[in-house]
Amino acid sequence: MIQITIKENNKAAKAFLAFAKTLSFLKIEQIEVEKPRYNVETEKAIKDFREGRGKIIKAKNAKELIEKLNA
């Protein structure tokens, strides 16, 4: 068994996939890959917060927020 990942976002990939589908000896299974909403660090922070390990910083405006973050 060989697994090939094809990102179908360009013409060459679409053409290759169309060609591969014509070959009777290939079994093609298309799966959807769930992309995270945010980067890894942000997803971890969201998970930590939901599990009670997060920290909330409240501020009236951006200037106050920056001051609190730098403190």
Image: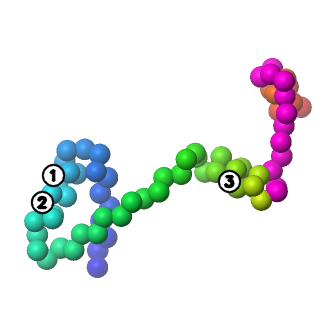
Which one is nearer the viewer's eye here, 37 or 4? 37
**Residue 13 on the magenta segment:** no
Local packing at callout 1 (Cα closer than 10 Å; few below 14, some 14-19, many 20+) is few
Q: Amino acid at mark 2?
A: Phe
- Of the numbered discs in the image, which one, if any, rests on residue 44? 3
Q: Secondary structure at mark 2?
A: helix
Is mark 2 in CB contact (under 8 Å) with mark 1? Answer: yes
Nearer-N-terminus badge (2/3): 2
Residue at 82 percent of width and 56 percent of height: 52
Read off the magenta span.
52-63
Which one is nearer the viewer's eye here, 67 or 47? 47
Q: Is residue 32 visible?
A: yes
Is mark 1 in CB contact (under 8 Å) with mark 3? Answer: no
Residue at 20 percent of width and 51 percent of height: 14
- Find residue 16 and report its horizontal and vertical position in percent: 17, 56
- Of the numbered discs in the image, which one, if any, rests on residue 19? 2
- Of the numbered discs in the image, which one, if any, rests on residue 15? 1
